[in-house]
Image: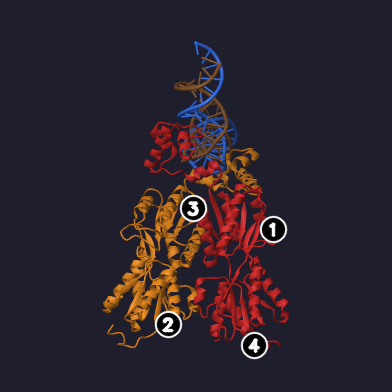
Chain colours: A red, B orange, C blue, D brown
Amino acid sequence: MKENLTSMAKRLGISVSTVSRVLSGNAEKYRISPETAEKVKAEARRCNYSPSLVAQGLRRQKTRTVGLLLPALTNPYFAEMAGTVITECRRRGYTTIVIDTMEDTATFNDGVAQLVSRQVDGILAAPCGQDPKFLEKVDIDIVPVVLIDRYYENSALPFVSTNNFKGGYDATRFLLSHGHRNIACIQGTPLSTPNNERVRGYLDAMDEERCGEFISVTGNEFSIQNGYTEARIMLAGENPPSAIFSLSNTITLGVLKALREAKLRIPGDISLVSFDNYSYMDYMDPPLTRIGQPVEDMATLAVKILFERMDSRGQASSQLKLSPSVISGESVGFVKPGRQAGA
Amino acid sequence: MKENLTSMAKRLGISVSTVSRVLSGNAEKYRISPETAEKVKAEARRCNYSPSLVAQGLRRQKTRTVGLLLPALTNPYFAEMAGTVITECRRRGYTTIVIDTMEDTATFNDGVAQLVSRQVDGILAAPCGQDPKFLEKVDIDIVPVVLIDRYYENSALPFVSTNNFKGGYDATRFLLSHGHRNIACIQGTPLSTPNNERVRGYLDAMDEERCGEFISVTGNEFSIQNGYTEARIMLAGENPPSAIFSLSNTITLGVLKALREAKLRIPGDISLVSFDNYSYMDYMDPPLTRIGQPVEDMATLAVKILFERMDSRGQASSQLKLSPSVISGESVGFVKPGRQAGA
DNA sequence: TATATTTGCGCAAACGTTTGTGCGGTTAAC
DNA sequence: GTTAACCGCACAAACGTTTGCGCAAATATA
């Protein structure tokens, strides 16, 4: 049942090399006669032979496989990314090994080691941890690496990411333009580039508008729980914000829970802008105003760049930040001018 | 930089076999002296050797890899499944190759062929298409297969799925118990087992309550678009339902869009129950009443069964249906008794 | 007819492991 | 002082491919 070149060669009474050459499409290159070639192909069809990609991988030192490391597939943002990457790789005849690193640096490093052991031809990663050294070493010595979503500040590793600064900035400006001044920002893990860039955008916008006194950045995780906790603390404080800028879809769900418990109406009592975009957000109460990331474009581009690097290692390292977009919902209201002027 | 047994053996002045035996933990089995063993291990650490899993795979005819085929990673239901499967496999020292079949039978079959070529040690699949023959053949001749979520009616292939019949039945009974009689069901792809079982549950419940005259099953795809279209048609009809039973999260989003456009209030004007459960549904307008599937349990169990079959091929084929749960939201209202009695 | 070229294909090494077998040397048994 | 048992390791084949090289026969050239 498990056919291989040898068994077919034996049956045909010819050598393995001839069979191999025919089936790998090198018949004329090696001057195999059309008749022989046809016989081989027929036999291959007959016993529906499929080559062992393991053996091929060993011999060719190419596995036609790429590795994908993501922090959490349960996050629909990364799930969509994974879907696109897998499909794009498939289009090119490559299969994808996915590793869910669970936001854990050890698991991440382990995963990279696994991929190297498996001799993948390229690695796509949203890294965990702050130290680029390991990945840089892998990239230089072993196999090309392209980062996606998250990247390292001081590294030449190529990446494709959202322009998170712009996202943070635009979101904040959107709130400012509606008269809000006391705008609180609830962040995710403070160690990741996307988070820090979003915060920087928020800070810049606030500063531009001379709202330094209202600046408030809290939270420490991209999770529902974190959003809930921070929102509760905030609402219990003495000068609660008129608007919240939530840095992820998960945080937003937590915030919503807190607001609902506090019986606050959106946008009547408080306004909300969230990072990330999913169709369900149009059906929430109220539909959310949000910052959409071009997930599909990012994934497609990252794959493209990875394959370019796989083809020829000489490429200049591209570091791309794609623009996010503001998607209007109904979760942002106007504040009467002057109302918050005196803090 | 890329170390292997040979290079290390050469440097140590001993044979490859000895190095191999030490590093694969068979030192004492082959009576390698502790001193030699230590030297080898030290050298391996020094040049941080990691074995080529490709070569190992070829020699051992085991790749420590499982293949996972899913219809659409963009669906958070499958994304969560993928996450759990990947993590469970990782726990056991296996990596996972994920294939997104995009609900396409050809892509699915292709994917299975790929996995076979790559000599995965086991396959986990939510199949596309109705013909179990191919997969059965693979399962018997090549590598164990376990189905997940979707399965074949007349096949001995093991599977783990939700008890979709119960889900459909419970959902319908829930609506019936609130006085609804004219309950419309919007289905997904009519060729998949989950869909058909859910519909069967709906039909059974309706029949039990002698509501045969109100039975209405429409739609043909697990998509937002389908939900939207069918809901619109339904509302334009002459005897619109008082409740809708939507067979997936995606369909539900479409239904919501249609209802909103028609300015119908939930549950005031119309009630809604949806299959699938996500935390965001608690924050919708209104929070949805829904049927939750035990995704994580399913995935964990499926992996468990797969590994049992991988260990010893003799296992009895287990076919499991896990119970779904009704999660109460606020999208179902009471109907005044008798109101719909006369159709 | 003798030489050169081409045609069609097989040999064998290599990719990096694993593992059955066997060999020389030390130690034990008698 | 034989023979037996054991210890520590090396040899080589195998897993299923790919591919450089070369060989014999056929054909072309002179």
Is residue B32 visible to us here?
no
Residue at 60% across / 80% down in the picture? A231
Mark 4 surroundings within 10 Å by alpha-carbon count, few (fewer than 14), some (14 through 19), many (20 or more): few
- Where disc 2 sits, the SS reads loop
Q: Which chain carries label 4?
A: A
Mark 3 surroundings within 10 Å by alpha-carbon count, few (fewer than 14), some (14 through 19), many (20 or more): many
**Among the two numbered marks 1 and 4 on one chain, the one whose residue lies closer to the N terminus:** 1
Amino acid beneath label 1: Ser
Mark-to-mark CA distance, 4 and 3: 61 Å
Residue, disc 2: B264
Q: Which chain carries label 1?
A: A
Q: Mark 2 lies on which chain?
A: B
Nearer the viewer's eye, disc 1 or disc 4? 4
- Say if mark 4 contacts mark 2, CB within 8 Å: no
Measured from the top left, where is residue D18 in percent x and y?
52, 39
- Where disc 1 sits, the SS reads loop
Is residue A42 visible to us here?
yes
Mark 1 surroundings within 10 Å by alpha-carbon count, few (fewer than 14), some (14 through 19), many (20 or more): few
| Marks 1 and 4 on same chain | yes
Measured from the top left, where is residue B129 in percent x and y?
37, 58
Amino acid beneath label 2: Leu
Q: Of the numbered discs in the image, which one, if any, rests on residue B253?
A: none
Residue, disc 4: A336
Q: Of the numbered discs in the image, which one, if any, rests on residue A155?
A: 1
- Say if mark 1 contacts mark 3, CB within 8 Å: no
- Where disc 4 sits, the SS reads loop
Q: Of the numbered discs in the image, which one, if any, rests on residue B65?
A: 3
